[in-house]
Amino acid sequence: MVNAKAELNRYFVMIDRRVPLRVSRSIRWLRKPTSFGARTVVASLLIIGGIFSFLPVLGLWMLPLGLLLIAQDVPFLQRPLVKSLAWVEVALQGLKMKWQNSRAGTGHSRNHSPK
């Protein structure tokens, strides 16, 4: 089995590809060992923001990012977090496939407008 630290790094790479350059730079800086204090504060704020994602400004995306940042320093959280994120990743892929199949089955496509 792949080690949990390597999987955490894989998730950070996935996030890095999907966020704007400025955010990516910030995350890379936070991951440095010298940024422990800032990483802890930012991760805590992200987790709290993720919990309150029902508010308009905050979002659920904050929770996994905060947990990833915390897990970097707390080894016993790494394996459960990686398992949870892998489960979510598989579930989202399944939903995406179902959605694509349902759209293909109804004859809808993005390039064609209904007649």
Image (tube, helix red, strand yellow):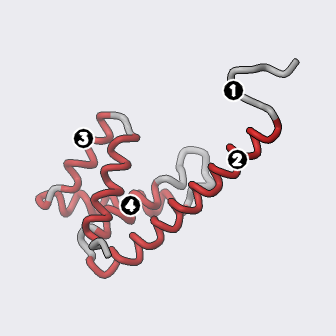
Which mark is drawn over residue 66? 4
Element carrying mark 1: loop
Q: Left of 35 or right of it: where is 47?
A: right
Which mark is drawn over residue 25? 3
Crowding around mark 2 (Cα neighbors within 10 Å: few <14, some 14 to 19, many 20+) is: few
Task: Name the amino acid type tagged 1.
Answer: Arg
Q: Earlier in the sequence, mark 3 or mark 1?
A: 3
Mark-to-mark CA distance, 1 and 4: 35 Å
Which mark is drawn over residue 99? 2
Question: Quarter-wise, where is residue 93 in the image?
Answer: bottom right
Residue appearing at x 33%, y 74% in the figure = 78
Q: Earlier in the sequence, mark 1 or mark 4?
A: 4
Q: What is the quadrant of the N terminus in the image?
A: bottom left
The residue carrying mark 1 is 110
Task: Name the amino acid type tagged 3.
Answer: Arg
Task: Name the amino acid type tagged 2.
Answer: Trp
Residue lying at the far right in this picture: please name it: 115
Q: Position of residue 82 (x, y in %)?
A: 39, 70
Residue in the foreground of this view, choosing between 80 and 114: 114
Mark-to-mark CA distance, 3 and 1: 34 Å
Mark-to-mark CA distance, 4 and 2: 29 Å
Q: What is the quadrant of the C terminus in the image?
A: top right
Task: Name the amino acid type tagged 4.
Answer: Gly
